[in-house]
Amino acid sequence: MIRQLGLVGCGLMAGSFALALRRAGLVERIVAYSPSERTTRRALELGVIDQRAHTAVQAVSHSDVVLLGVPVRSTQACLEEIRDHLAPDALLMDVGSTKGDVIEAAKHALGKRLGQFLPAHPIAGKELAGIDHADVELYRQRVTILTPLPDNTPAQIEL
């Protein structure tokens, strides 16, 4: 059971992930940050999240699992911003469409915390983006490619 899921970026991919965890009964609380207040307001209205965060740091603080749903080009800056606010045992994942550059960004940004990051690439999506198109079924019957790093533990991969 995930006590708190923190979303940084709250669009189609992150919103769909949150909805699927909620439906499966695997998460108690979902907190999300997006640079667009409209996005998190809408996510709250749609029941995708339980609480709007005003900063990325607020979204990840006290979260067991953190999912980055930001554009790949924003990954390093986002990771640098949240790095020192991750719980020591939090699992950090992403839904970026590429992995090589995301992993490089993580290596530069996370330092000692790199082992908390488990890169993921869901082979899922829609032609429409944004929280209004989040879909509880988006990941069903889809493959998600995990690209574990040397420091990832079997428990992280299993989660």
Image: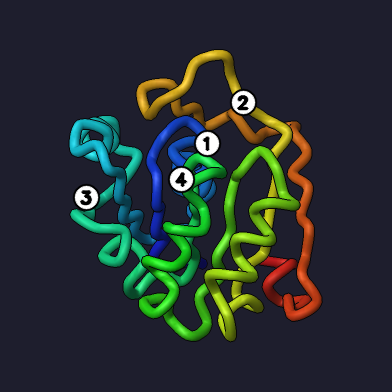
CA gap between label 2 and label 3 equals 24 Å
**Circle 4 sits in a helix, a strand or a loop, which is it?**
helix
| Amino acid type at image mark 3 | Arg
| Amino acid type at image mark 2 | Gly
Residue corresponding to mark 3? 52
Mark 2 and 4 residues: CB-CB less than 8 Å, in contact?
Answer: no
> How many other residues sit within 10 Å of disc 3, few (<14), some (14-19) or many (≥20)?
many
Mark 1 and 2 residues: CB-CB less than 8 Å, in contact?
Answer: yes
Q: Earlier in the sequence, mark 3 or mark 4?
A: 4
The foreground one among 131 and 135 is 131
Residue at coordinates 59% horizontally, 70% vertically from top-left? 108
Q: Position of residue 128 (x, y in %)?
A: 50, 15
| Vertical placement of residue 106 versus 115, above or below | above
> How many other residues sit within 10 Å of disc 1, few (<14), some (14-19) or many (≥20)?
many
Q: Earlier in the sequence, mark 2 or mark 4?
A: 4
Q: Earlier in the sequence, mark 4 or mark 1?
A: 1
Residue at coordinates 36% horizontally, 77% vertically from top-left? 85
Q: Nearer the viewer, mark 2 or mark 4?
A: 2
| Amino acid type at image mark 4 | Ala
Residue corresponding to mark 1? 13
Mark 4 and 1 residues: CB-CB less than 8 Å, in contact?
Answer: no
Q: Earlier in the sequence, mark 3 or mark 1?
A: 1
> How many other residues sit within 10 Å of disc 2, few (<14), some (14-19) or many (≥20)?
some
- Image quadrant assignment for residue 95: top right
Q: Position of residue 41 (x, y in %)?
A: 19, 36
The foreground one among 37 and 41 is 37
CA gap between label 1 and label 2 equals 7 Å
CA gap between label 3 and label 1 equals 17 Å
**Circle 3 sits in a helix, a strand or a loop, which is it?**
strand
